Image (cartoon, rainbow, N blue to C red):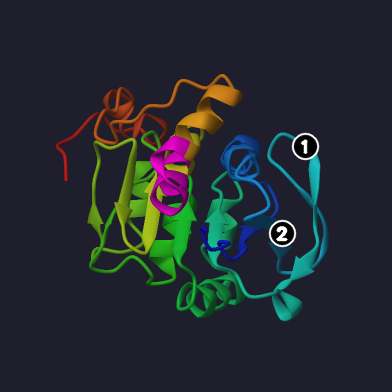
Amino acid sequence: MTATQPTRTLGAILYERFELLDCYGPLEMFGSVGPELRIVTVAEKSGPVASVQGPKTVAEYQFANCPKLDLILLPGGVGTVEQLGNAALHAFLRDRAKTAEVTMSVCSGSAILAKAGLLDGRRATSNKQWFDLARMQSANVKWVTEARWVEDDPFATSSGVSAGIDMALAVIARLYGRAKAEEIAEATEYEWHIDSTRDPFVKFLNKAMGGGAGGGA
């Protein structure tokens, strides 16, 4: 008889003007795992949190009463810039990452992880068009410019927006098996980009910041 796998808790960390797909793309995948995975929403203060696109998500927990998190998902978005100065968020992430099995960021969310000092000495990537926003937060991170996502256990960082879905499936494959990840991709009719090094969007490196494509990391 196969032993029952303990239930993991994934915390989606919200802040004002987060990117919807950064959050809900991965949550669609993780939410399809089954009863072995519970998803909660967390923000500095509980209650509705507005996305860049407008729709609000209710944060069930605030930092002060957040349950133990086995997995952490930090989206990016326009609100990233303001959160780079949010010491409370940085302290929360540093504290919870100590005991999390995997801490994940999507898009510019890696800039926040870098600012909090969590990616020092590790490989990481970020949104291509705003790549230098992340790179400016820490020179001690091994920034990878050409990657769909990067895993440096216990951290996983993805490129822009939709890339978070590919990262989520990769983490699901690691934790629950490749067959489970493929099953979820098929059920959601999603074409999984399995090769993390294939990055068709690197040609837009720093385009939004007024720069051109540069060398890899």
Q: Which residues are magenta?
A: 169-179
Image quadrant assignment for residue 128:
top left
Judge the density around disc 1: few (<14), some (14-19), many (≥20) Cα neighbours within 10 Å: few
Query: On screen, 190 above or below 48?
Result: above
Q: Which residue is mark 2?
A: 40
In the rendered structure, does residue 177 fall within the stretch colored magenta? Answer: yes
Numbered mark located on residue 154 in the image:
none
Q: Residue furthest right?
A: 47
How many angstroms separate mark 1 from mark 2 (CA)? 20 Å
Question: Please, what secondary structure does the residue beneath circle 1 have?
Answer: loop
State the image coordinates of residue 135 (x, y, percent, origin top left). Answer: 31, 53
**Residue on which disc 1 sits:** 54
Q: Are marks 1 and 2 in contact (CB under 8 Å)?
A: no
> Could you say where residue 6 lies in the image, as x and y percent from the top left?
58, 66
Q: Secondary structure at mark 2?
A: strand
The residue lying at 51 percent from left, 58 percent from top is 2
- Name the quadrant containing residue 10: bottom right
Task: Give the total of numbered labels.
Answer: 2
Q: Check disc 1 and give the amino acid type.
A: Gly
Query: Residue at (30%, 32%) from the top-left corner?
Result: 205
| Residue at image location 25% in from the left, 63% down from the top | 122
89 vs 64, nearest the viewer: 64
Secondary structure that dominates the magenta span: helix
User: Is residue 107 positioned above or below 152 on the image?
Assistant: above
Instruction: Return the x and y of residue 171 as percentages of the image width and height.
Output: 43, 48
Q: Give the left or right position of residue 147, taking residue 100 as reference.
A: left
- The amino acid beneath tag 2 is Val
